[in-house]
Image (cartoon, grey):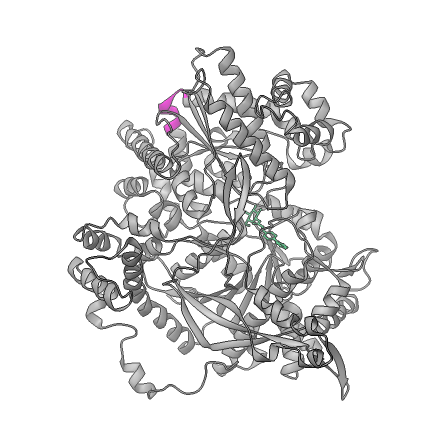
């Protein structure tokens, strides 16, 4: 429960004279011999393994420690400079960080990749074998979590002092397997094997209070919690490209404390209730909730969200005070960003600490809080919007509920009466989006279209009462992981063609446009795509026993399985394609490999039905000797960040086909285009801006617009009408209904058929014909390799604005008012 504080153990001037983290000569680029010496040292003295008998795991851990050592100099130096120069820090609060692997990324960012490859070569160890041995840190569901990871990396690359704050889940996102085509979930256990990137900070822990009641003492409210759970810090260094700066990802683990046992209840004979605090503490850090885009109002989730938020806000205040800051100057030194509403209790928590612990009056506390906080919205889906029943709030966080009520009335005092049905608290619930909005000085959406819809449809009242608060920051992706690391052949060609520097200045890719008419360059570009396909095909063979052709169009849809993302549209079209090839096998079809990847939330029945249909269709089609060489469907299980790194470089066609108005941004769409895939997509999320950038000719557009979607949903029987107007679609649905893909179980996919015929909220049927037409244009374009290559190159060349560095700079200007230290 102690804060790390007190004077340094050695006099400050002694500390100052030590070059941070390493000997000076080690800061210069090491030779392969030196790297080998470090590696052998760690293998023996850290891992405890005999070099003669060491396993891949042993070597991987030894290498990770070797690399981690190199991260310490920039890491400690960054912290020291931030303190000494009293710089403003950004604190990114997120329930999810989908980091993936760290070994290769950190090695590359430290500029050590070549020397490490050479050092390992001398030992007969391929670097990729060690890199591939690392489990993904899968502490997230999808886009929101991966965005947080890209942003951390960019903040380090830009030299922006920052902390990522999250939870150290024992089990990340479940592992997906398939049995008879059905999704099977098993627990993920990344922490079973030692995590070499982790620094445990036992001296940095904060008590997080829960439950209890509020008393009035001397006219001031006092929260008497029923128990406390201890949040203990675990730190990971996140090194920026170039190795000049590193920030911290701080993950909280929930610890038991002796005080967790409720002795009063035990003595009163209520043994089960007495153990409840302990049970809650044990569950808090256990598992990531696997629902994306669905809020379920579970007490444990609320407790997790508060645990993350309270520990982080306490940590931030403690650091500010430890550095001699006055809390009134908090906004000069501290920005806190809420990644969606999951940490939205940060507003009330900061107010509570300022008022109850530090003696502030409520109004200045609220003022300070809003100046510190920013809120990013990632969704418009009604079922994803968090709202907590008042009873639950009162039970778990009674003091916070008082503060929320006060915020609500203060809004009326400040800004006048609100229209009927507005307010933080309505229909018996606290609405966390409204709370996050009111507690922040900036609110942002994640693409131009999304921000417009956030303003118009989600927060029209709040927006009109606080003009200028809503801004747009279109998402971005880190070009280091998503090009330099994931696609080394293409990265090398880019560097060869326009020089290095694009890694941190992605707009330089524009320079590729000058080479688009050079046949030699186009050919070289085509070779990199083929190399990526070879690499993917090898992996599919080795890891999954699937063999795929190389001379085919790789058509890929990877993302969470959700009705609005419309994997179903893609599957239905795949069936139509199969039927057409069977009718006329010699019609000169462009061979296609259709790849699906993604997980369904375990309780999302329809999404699971879609997975089963995809697998059933794959089984039937891949087994057909007539079509086998022209159409193949591949659905490797357990899609994750590492799989994305293999699939994206090999992709020709990127499927971004959500119902318009429903995908906030998408970030996979950016990764594909950056790797030279063309997009088939709707005018949704960041697709709109991608199309603007790459040019309409280099993007396969189809489908209803967001406005048309809204209107079309009011047309009675739109699904049925669309089916009746499309012979192609009727044939597809007929084939499913006859049981072709579910022999012996004809009605297996009845629920999906029923949805399409009778409701079709996601407008799969209404967009089918236009999607089909766009796919025909894809075939035509692919039939002219030169032209395809040209368009693919233009996609790469025009993706500059989608760097996460650009996004972070916009946050620095528009939201955080923070500067780089470099
Ligand atoms: C909420 C309550 C309880 C349990 C879980 C959740 C929950 C968890 C995760 C709700 C939503 C999420 C994740 C949402 C998400 O990933 N959204 C995506 O964010 C990306 C980054 O901005 C966008 O690119 C995607 O468009 C958006 O879908």
Pick whichever, 821 or 237, lies toward us: 237
Dominant secondary-structure state across the stretch colored magenta? helix
Q: Residue at x 68, y 62 (%)?
A: 299
207 or 61: nearer the viewer:
61
Residue at 15 percent across and 60 percent down: it is 33
Q: Is residue 78 left or right of residue 606?
A: left
Q: Is 268 on the left-hand or right-hand side of 317?
A: right
Residue interval drawn in magenta: 783-789
Q: Is residue 90 left or right of residue 709?
A: left
Numbered disc total: 0
- Identify the image quadrant of residue 468: bottom right
Say whether residue 371 is visible. no
The quarter holding residue 298 reads: bottom right
Q: Is residue 590 above or below residue 183?
A: above
Q: Residue at x 70, y 35 (%)?
A: 761
In percent of width and height, residue 565 lies at 59, 38
Q: Whole-percent x and y of residue 237?
A: 39, 65
- Quadrant of residue 647 within the rendered picture: top left
Compared with 403, 476 (above or below) is above
- Residue 408 percent location from the top left of the image: 76, 66
Estimate the x, y position of residue 600 in percent, counting from the top left. Answer: 57, 43
Frontmost residue, 730 versus 322: 730
Residue 471 visible? The answer is: yes
Q: In the picture, which quadrant includes the C terminus?
A: bottom left
In the depicted structure, whether residue 542 falls above or below residue 629 = below
Residue 404: within the magenta?
no
């Amino acid at each position: 429960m102690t804060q790390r504080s007190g004077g340094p153990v050695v006099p400050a001037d002694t500390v100052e004279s030590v070059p941070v983290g390493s000997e000076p000569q080690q800061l210069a680029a090491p030779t392969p011999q030196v790297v080998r010496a470090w590696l052998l040292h760690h293998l023996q003295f850290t891992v405890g393994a005999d070099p003669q008998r060491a396993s891949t795991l042993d070597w991987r851990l030894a290498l990770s420690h070797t690399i981690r050592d190199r991260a310490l100099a920039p890491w400690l130096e960054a912290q020291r400079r931030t303190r000494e120069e009293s710089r403003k820090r950004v604190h990114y609060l997120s329930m999810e960080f989908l980091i993936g692997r760290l070994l290769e990324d950190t090695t590359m960012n430290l500029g050590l990749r070549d020397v490490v490859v050479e050092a390992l070569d001398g030992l007969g160890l391929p670097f990729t074998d060690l890199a591939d041995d690392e489990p993904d840190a899968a502490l997230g569901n999808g886009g929101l979590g991966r965005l947080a990871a890209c942003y951390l990396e960019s903040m380090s690359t830009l030299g922006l002092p920052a902390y990522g704050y999250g939870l150290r889940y024992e089990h990340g996102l479940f592992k997906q397997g398939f049995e008879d085509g059905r999704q099977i979930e098993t627990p993920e256990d990344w922490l079973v094997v030692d995590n070499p990137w982790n620094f445990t900070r036992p001296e940095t822990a904060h008590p997080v209070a829960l439950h209890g009641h509020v008393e009035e003492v001397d006219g001031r409210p006092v929260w008497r919690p029923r128990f406390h759970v201890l949040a203990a810090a675990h730190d990971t260094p996140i090194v920026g490209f170039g190795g000049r700066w590193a920030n911290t990802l701080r993950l909280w683990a929930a610890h038991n404390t002796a005080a967790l046992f409720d002795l009063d209840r035990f003595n009163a004979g209520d043994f089960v209730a007495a153990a409840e605090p302990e049970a809650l503490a044990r569950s808090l850090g256990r598992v990531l909730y696997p629902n994306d885009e669905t809020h379920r109002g579970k007490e444990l989730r609320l407790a997790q969200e508060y645990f993350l938020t309270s520990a982080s806000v306490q940590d931030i205040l403690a650091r500010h005070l430890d550095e001699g800051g006055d809390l009134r100057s908090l906004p000069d030194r501290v920005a806190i960003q809420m990644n969606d509403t999951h940490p939205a209790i940060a507003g009330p928590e900061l107010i509570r600490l300022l008022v109850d612990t530090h003696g502030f009056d409520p109004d200045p506390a609220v003022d300070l809080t809003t100046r510190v906080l920013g809120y990013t919205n990632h969704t418009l889906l009604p079922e994803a919007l968090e709202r907590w029943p008042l009873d639950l709030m009162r039970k778990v966080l009674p003091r916070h509920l008082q503060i929320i009520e006060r915020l609500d009335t203060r809004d009326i005092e400040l800004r006048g009466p609100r229209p009927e049905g507005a307010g933080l608290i309505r229909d018996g619930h606290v609405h966390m989006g409204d709370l996050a909005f009111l507690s922040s000085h900036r609110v942002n959406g994640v693409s131009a279209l999304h921000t417009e819809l956030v303003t118009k449809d989600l927060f029209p009242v709040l927006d009109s009462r606080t003009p200028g608060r809503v801004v747009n920051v279109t998402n971005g992706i880190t070009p280091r992981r998503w090009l330099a690391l994931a696609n080394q052949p293409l990265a090398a060609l880019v560097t060869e063609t326009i020089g290095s520097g694009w890694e941190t200045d992605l707009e330089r890719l524009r320079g590729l446009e000058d080479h688009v008419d050079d046949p030699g360059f186009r050919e070289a570009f085509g070779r990199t795509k083929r190399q990526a396909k070879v690499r993917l095909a090898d992996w599919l063979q080795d890891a999954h026993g699937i063999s795929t052709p190389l001379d085919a169009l790789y058509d890929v849809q990877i993302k969470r399985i959700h009705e609005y993302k419309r994997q179903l549209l893609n599957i239905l079209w795949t069936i139509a394609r199969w039927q057409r090839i069977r009718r006329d096998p010699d019609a000169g079809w462009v061979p296609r490999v259709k790849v699906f990847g993604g997980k369904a939330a375990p309780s999302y029945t329809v999404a699971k039905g879609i997975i089963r249909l995809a697998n059933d269709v794959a089984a039937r089609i891949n087994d057909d000797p007539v079509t086998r060489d022209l159409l193949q469907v591949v659905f490797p299980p357990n899609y994750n960040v590492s799989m994305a790194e293999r699939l994206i470089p090999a992709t020709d066609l990127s499927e971004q086909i959500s119902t318009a108005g429903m995908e906030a941004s998408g970030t996979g769409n950016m990764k594909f285009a950056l790797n030279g895939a063309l997009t088939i997509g709707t005018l949704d999320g960041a697709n709109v801006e991608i199309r603007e950038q790459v040019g309409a000719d280099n993007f396969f557009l189809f489908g209803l617009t967001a406005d048309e979607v809204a209107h079309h949903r009011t047309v009675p029987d739109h699904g049925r009408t669309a089916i009746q107007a499309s012979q192609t679609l009727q044939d597809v649905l007929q084939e499913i209904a006859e049981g072709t893909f579910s022999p012996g179980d004809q009605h297996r996919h009845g629920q999906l058929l029923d949805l399409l015929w009778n409701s079709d909220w996601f407008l799969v049927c209404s967009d089918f014909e236009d999607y089909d037409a766009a796919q025909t244009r894809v075939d035509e374009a692919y039939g002219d390799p030169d032209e395809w290559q040209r368009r693919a190159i233009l996609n790469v060349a025009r993706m500059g604005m989608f760097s996460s560095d650009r996004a972070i700079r916009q946050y620095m200007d528009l939201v955080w008012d923070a500067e780089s230290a470099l």
